[in-house]
Image (cartoon, rainbow, N blue to C red):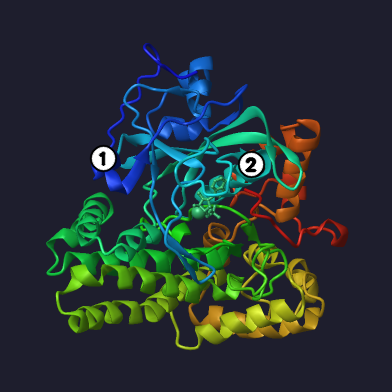
Amino acid sequence: MKTTAHTILELAFDNSYARLPERFFARLDPTPVAAPKLIKLNVALAQQLGLDADELSSPEGVRMLAGNLVPPGAEPLAMAYAGHQFGSWVPQLGDGRAILLGEVVDQHGTRFDIQLKGSGLTPFSRSGDGRAWLGPVLREYIVSEAMAALGVPTTRALAAISSGEIVHREALMPGAVLTRVARSHIRIGTFQFFSARKDVDALRELTDYVIARHYPEAADAPIPSLAMLDAIVGRQAALVTRWQGIGFIHGVMNTDNMSVAGETIDYGPCAFMDTYHPATVFSSIDQMGRYAYQNQPGIAQWNLAQLAQALLPLIDDDVQTAIHHAQAVIDSYPERYEQAYMAVMRAKLGLLTAQDNDITLITDLLDCMAKNNADFTLTFRRLSMLSATNTDGNIAQDSPVRDLFEDPDAFDLWTVAWRQRLAQEASEDNKRRTAMSAVNPAFIPRNHQVEGVIQAAVKDEDFGPFEELVSVLAKPYTDQPTHHKYAIPPQPDEIVRQTFCGT
Ligand code: AMP
Ligand code: MG
């Protein structure tokens, strides 16, 4: 049963996407769920968006977040898009289990999509059931909110609802609905959808829309579509460097999972590395390691090249000229990536200046970590605490870090070069420690913790661990001694090596 609210849920919707041509989406209401119950409302995010947290957690608010009630002003729709999945072209994907309720504008004038994920069948559902189960909903809530707290551009989680329904996966699982908030849900695959249909009018409208919404400065460029591409390349390069800097592995970097707003989107089998190994892959379906940690920067460029391809008809009427322009932008990616990456890694090492051979210092440490099974997060966090002067080679002083390495001597060797480098810029311990602690997190959503939280919720309906993990991860750069267990790597028998899309 779907009803329209009349009194309390007065969200100030302004649905610009719903004003685009009808072939951009399918209009339909979410399918109500049997017995919606609020698992979690993100009160801080609600406030930031100017939404009333009390209203959202009221029975009427929960029905809205479950898709059982369409609030006034919402114009629900499922977006159309296509995409390359693991490199293979799929001409039609689209929101198969998500429905965009509408858009709101926050206090700062920033426009946000409010989308329900797990909200029932749509014309894009293909063989899926349109639903989500509790595990992926909790994973997305935990990880996307952790990313936001880490300062990485990302979609956000406004609420998690249990549906009171059973969802058929490998086993029977409790159903859930996630409310996702994003700068927009437009993907590289959205452009590809129209490109594949040779619908240049739609491509032009989509481009104008994305420029107005995300890249207004591109409107004044000689070739706005090219300027938009250039801006998207810049944001993607910056985004992936942030992932690399915290050991985040997205897991499914298909072109339909890449937001043109430059946010991390579509958290599926994503996970963070514990021990540093560049070839790390978690996703059960990524058998070739296409989306391994070390491949993420290159894959982002490959995806951007698909966007460039889709935009060609807008860049110039002459194909060769269009290709020439687009290629130049795509070719600029490696250098822009490298620059952004070096900035991230220098900050992680506590360097304030740039020197030519800094890359060697960085790769030597990473190589040493890989050879010695050192924990990525802890190595950098504890490195933040070391002193720049250990002239007497006092091993005990460095032990919090060196003990993370199977061969601690290998780390000692690296610290000689690091300290020489710090000496060259007269690095001050206190200042450097503060700066390094602000970029090297103490807490990341460690995979075994995330799995533990999901287990407790699914097996025992115990959401206490979920609450605690979410609250610890809200302050990732603050030492929280009482929550030490969330900072440490898994014991050998706790390691979780594989994650599942499990949608
Ligand atoms: P994802 O792997 O989450 O990026 O999803 C890829 C495509 O599969 C998208 O078009 C989704 O909407 C669709 N999809 C994933 N899970 C389901 C589901 N349970 N029901 C319907 N469509 C789904
Ligand atoms: Mg997706």
* 10 Å crowding of disc 1: few (<14), some (14-19), many (20+): some
Residue denoted by label 1: 16
Q: CA distance from mark 1 to mark 2?
A: 29 Å
Residue at 62% x, 34% y: name it: 176
* Quarter of the image where one finds residue 205: bottom left
Q: Amino acid at mark 2?
A: Leu
* Quarter of the image where one finds residue 371: bottom right
Q: Is residue 135 left or right of residue 322?
A: right
* 10 Å crowding of disc 2: few (<14), some (14-19), many (20+): many
Residue closest to the eye, 416 or 378: 378
Residue 64 on image: x %, y %: 47, 24
Say if mark 1 contacts mark 2, CB within 8 Å.
no
Residue 407 on image: x %, y %: 81, 80
Q: Amino acid at mark 1?
A: Ser
Q: Is residue 179 left or right of residue 212?
A: right
Q: Which mark is residue 434?
A: none
Rendered position, 266 above or below 69: below
Q: Is residue 345 left or right of residue 323?
A: right
Q: Is residue 200 left or right of residue 81?
A: left
Residue at 36% x, 12% y: name it: 6
Residue denoted by label 2: 138
For discs 1 and 2, the disc positioned in front in the rendered view: 1
